[in-house]
């Protein structure tokens, strides 16, 4: 009997998913749409005690990451990918509505980001990256700088004290410039809309690279 050729053809786009961590504590589900050998879009959803704690949507341009997830991750159907996109969209849009009364900033350290926050929600946007976090944030922004709540350091915990020193230096170097909320919303829409065409159900597949037009 002739052995069948079972090699899988990875025509683009295809979708992979991997889970990191323990569901009991913290874990994240990374879902990628592979557009070519060196381009993809990551939708990462982090969970803390089974509640969404973090969302990240970004472009992936590292061929090694894409290759590793191709073989180490799980291939999923488009319908499963669409469920992840819907979850990310609903979570992001809900957070943006919650943050609508808050001030918007350009956050400057080495690079610049559009930034917005409240006591429990924080969102940061750059050219090809949307990063949303849910937590209890212990800081305010005053006079263009982040002011954190002060805690009494323990002389016994050397490593924690060193870490706090690093955090203080970063806060000191980071500047926050207030901008109009419309500019923040425009940046968010522009970055999000650069992704969503690839989130639609593909009408065809390509051997080397999936293109919309």
Image (cartoon, helix red, strand yellow):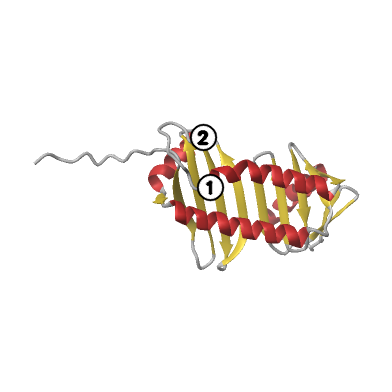
Badge 1 is on which residue? Answer: 200
Furthest-left residue in this view: 1
- Label 1 packing within 10 angstroms: few (<14), some (14-19), many (20+): few
Tell me the quarter of the image containing the N terminus: top left
Q: Residue at x 40, y 33 (%)?
A: 207
Query: Callout 2: helix, strand or loop?
Result: loop
Using the numbered discs, state the Cα–Cα distance from disc 1 to disc 2 in whole angstroms. Answer: 12 Å
**Can you give x and y, in whole percent of width and height, for residue 38 in the image?**
49, 33
On screen, residue 208 versus residue 133, left or right, reads left
Percent position of residue 99, x then y: 77, 59
Asked which secondary structure carries label 1, the reply is loop
Figure check: 143 above or below 26:
above
In the image, 197: left or right of 95?
Answer: left
Who's the residue at 38% across and 44% down the image? 71
| Closest to the observer, 78 or 166 | 78
Considering only order in the chain, which callout, 2 or 1, is on the residue closer to the N terminus?
Answer: 1
Q: Nearer the viewer, residue 154 or 52?
A: 52
Question: Where does the image place residue 42, in percent across and percent down from the top left?
Answer: 55, 46
Left or right: 31 as drawn, with respect to 152: left
| In-front residue for pair 124/147 | 124
Q: Are marks 1 and 2 in contact (CB under 8 Å)?
A: no
Relative vertical location of residue 61 with respect to residue 156 in this rendering, above or below: above
> x and y percent of residue 166 in the render?
73, 47
- Vertically, is 128 above or below 19? above
Locate the C terminus by quadrant: top right
Instruction: Determine which residue is flagged by label 2.
Output: 211
| Residue 114 seen by the camera | no
How packed is label 2: few (under 14 Cα within 10 Å), some, or many (20 or more)? some
State the count of labels.
2
Extreme residue in the right direction: 143
Examine the rendering and report whether any part of residue 99 can be seen: yes
Q: Nearer the viewer, residue 96 or 51?
A: 96
């Amino acid at each position: 009997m002739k052995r069948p050729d079972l090699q899988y053809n990875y025509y683009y786009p295809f979708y992979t998913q991997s889970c990191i961590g323990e569901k009991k504590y913290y874990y994240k589900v990374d879902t990628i749409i592979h557009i070519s050998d060196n381009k993809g879009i990551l939708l990462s959803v982090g969970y803390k005690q089974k509640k969404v704690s973090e969302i990240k949507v970004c472009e992936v341009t590292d061929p090694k990451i894409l290759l590793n997830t191709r073989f180490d991750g799980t291939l999923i159907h488009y319908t499963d990918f669409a469920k992840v996109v819907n979850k990310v969209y609903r979570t992001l849009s809900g957070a943006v509505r919650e943050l609508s009364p808050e001030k918007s900033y350009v956050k400057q350290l080495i690079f610049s980001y559009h930034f917005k926050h409240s006591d429990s929600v924080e969102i940061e946007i750059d050219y090809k990256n949307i990063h949303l976090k849910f937590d209890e944030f212990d800081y305010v922004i005053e006079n263009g700088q982040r002011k954190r709540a002060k805690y009494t350091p323990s002389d016994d915990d050397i490593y924690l004290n060193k870490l706090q020193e690093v955090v203080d230096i970063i806060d000191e170097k980071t500047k926050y410039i207030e901008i109009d909320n419309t500019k923040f919303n425009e940046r968010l829409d522009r970055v999000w809309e650069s992704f969503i065409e690839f989130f639609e159900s593909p009408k065809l597949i390509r051997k080397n690279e999936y293109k919309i037009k």
